[in-house]
Image: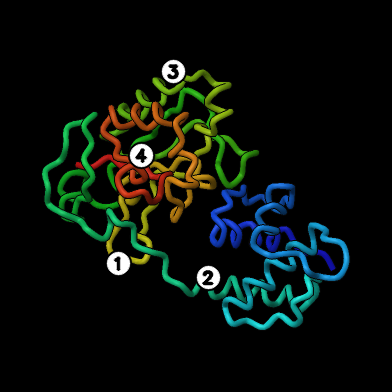
Amino acid sequence: MLPSVSNRKLAHGILNTRRRADLLVDGHIGPKTIAAASAWIPWTFEGKPTPSRWVAAIIQKESRLRAIHPGPFDAFYGPETSAAADSIRRQILAQPAPIRPDEEHATDRPSPAPGKIKCWSPTTAQLRARYGKEGTNQGIVASPYPLRLDWDLKTTVHRFSAHQSLVTVIENALRETLNHYGLDRIQALGLDRFGGCLNVRNKRGGTTPSTHSWGIAIDWYPSRNMLKQTRKTALFARPEYTHFLDLWASHGFMSLGRCYDFDWMHLQRNP
């Protein structure tokens, strides 16, 4: 029995959490994954350490840390280990997602001038006063270069919804990105990996609307700038992305990563 793709991806997620491994969660068990696994789990098992056995060992160890009993700790993947992986997922889903620091501490501080972005979080009342009811007053942004959906890289989009007051602002930022980097460099850095803009929902773990509900926040390259990643592992914390974040800041977009070292994908335009 071989581990499914979803369980290989689960192994990546475990190593990223436990070891800050900065692995691409793609289900490929390559040298970087094995190096992270072997640093966490000394190979004392009988037999050869194949990729599938490393996946089994990772899931079995994580299971024990979570008081789940997957059978013997032998690095062999079978029905018990597969069931343990399902139990790990259920535990993860049962844990409430953390509230981002900016969402937890909303204030009534005045809005900063574009290009001099301060770290602050507007209240729901401020957002409604400035942008209207959630999900309304939307326009269509036309991107000057194709954007790949980060969760489905075979699919590209050229347009997306955003608050109508920001359509020109966002289009200008995208045009400046293209002029500065060029398409080849954009794609090499993953600056075309789009994670979404308008999404009418509550804040993670909260009961009030996310700024995505107004289409005033954009997520870029979420798979390498995940919610809980810090500057130690988030891609956007690296020097080669400094100009990209500076560019968006010049258009009034706050980087949560820079402000809170959290959720580096998220760029937000406050009132």
The amino acid type, in three-letter code, at marker 1 is Thr
CA–CA distance in space, label 4 to label 1: 22 Å
Marks 4 & 3, CB-CB < 8 Å contact? no
Which mark identifies residue 133?
A: none
The amino acid type, in three-letter code, at marker 4 is Ala
Of the two numbered discs 1 and 2 in the rendering, the one whose residue sits closer to the viewer: 2
Estimate the x, y position of residue 85 in percent, counting from the top left. Answer: 66, 72
Residue at image location 57% in from the left, 56% down from the top: 16
In the foreground, 14 or 247: 14
Which residue is label 2 attached to?
A: 92
Which mark identifies residue 180?
A: 3
Of the two numbered discs 1 and 3 in the rendering, the one whose residue sits closer to the viewer: 3
Q: Is residue 4 left or right of residue 48?
A: left
Vertical arrangement, residue 138 with respect to residue 3, above or below: above
- Secondary structure under the numbered disc 4 in the rendered image: strand
Residue at image location 53% in from the left, 37% down from the top: 193
Of the two numbered discs 2 and 4 in the rendering, the one whose residue sits closer to the viewer: 2
The amino acid type, in three-letter code, at marker 2 is Ile
Of the two numbered discs 4 and 1 in the rendering, the one whose residue sits closer to the viewer: 1
* Quarter of the image where the C terminus is located: top left
- Secondary structure under the numbered disc 3 in the rendered image: helix
CA–CA distance in space, label 2 to label 4: 31 Å
Residue 135 visible at all: no
CA–CA distance in space, label 1 to label 2: 20 Å
CA–CA distance in space, label 4 to label 3: 23 Å
